[in-house]
Image (spheres, helix red, strand yellow):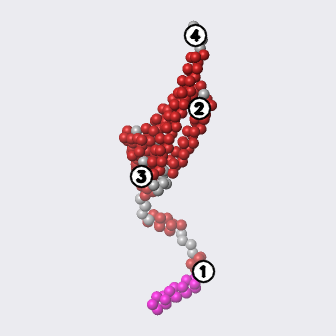
């Protein structure tokens, strides 16, 4: 241990004593040229890295395309298997009930179009009917938004189906009322029509 510290002290002393001599001499320019020529040229690795990045980028695009194709294929499968056309968000979360949700939504759409035809003579009545149905729809949308975070999804799904049933029942009652009003209006017009 003492030998290495003695050598170190002597080297430090030599450098201190001869510092002016070290600073006064600059290497010749030809020295740098000789050093540079003696270093072997490094292979062009940056070009390889760029090529590898390009290949990885290309691989990610292919993977993204395959993933997209699988996703679209899965949605087509759900549509064919469960008849999902109106509410694909619910179908993806609970595919077992997708057909039932679709059936109710189809019935609701059909009944709405019938009501719209029958209520063309009574726009005030149609507004009242729409307001009643709107409250059920808002309730359904709230249930639907809670579906992903619900601890008991089965109970929430049953509540959503009940809401759709209530909507269908309400629309049926509204249709019955409109049909009665239209029959009464037609019979009243018949009775008041002039006979020939």
Residue at 47% x, 67% y: name it. 35
Under tag 4, what secondary structure? loop
Q: Position of residue 29 (x, y in %)?
A: 53, 66
Q: Which residue is mark 1?
A: 20
Q: Which residue is mark 2?
A: 126
Q: Earlier in the sequence, mark 4 or mark 3?
A: 3
Query: How far apart are labels 3 and 2 at the CA level?
Result: 60 Å
Would you say residue 147 is visible in this rendering? Answer: yes
Question: Which span of residues is magenta-colored?
Answer: 1-20
Under tag 2, what secondary structure? helix
Proximity of marks 3 and 2: CB atoms separated by less than 8 Å = no
125 up-or-down from 61: above or below:
above
Under tag 1, what secondary structure? helix
| Disc nearest the viewer among 1 and 4 | 4
| Disc nearest the viewer among 1 and 3 | 3
185 up-or-down from 64: above or below:
above
């Amino acid at each position: 241990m003492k030998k290495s510290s003695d050598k170190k002290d002597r080297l430090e002393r030599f450098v201190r004593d001869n510092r002016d001599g070290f600073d006064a001499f600059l290497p010749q320019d030809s020295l740098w040229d000789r050093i540079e020529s003696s270093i072997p040229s490094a292979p062009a690795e940056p070009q390889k890295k760029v090529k590898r990045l390009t290949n990885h980028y290309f691989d990610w695009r292919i993977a993204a395309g395959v993933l997209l194709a699988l996703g679209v294929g899965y949605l087509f499968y759900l549509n064919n298997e469960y008849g999902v056309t109106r509410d694909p968000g619910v179908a993806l979360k609970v595919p077992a009930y997708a057909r039932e949700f679709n059936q109710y939504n189809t019935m609701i759409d059909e009944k709405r179009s019938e009501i719209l035809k029958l209520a063309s003579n009574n726009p005030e009545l149609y507004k009242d009917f729409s307001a009643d149905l709107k409250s059920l729809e808002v309730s359904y949308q709230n249930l639907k938004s809670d579906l992903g975070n619900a601890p008991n999804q089965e109970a929430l799904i049953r509540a959503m189906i009940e809401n759709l049933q209530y909507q269908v029942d309400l629309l049926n009652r509204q249709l019955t009322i409109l049909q009665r009003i239209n029959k009464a209006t037609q019979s009243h017009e018949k009775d008041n029509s002039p006979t020939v």
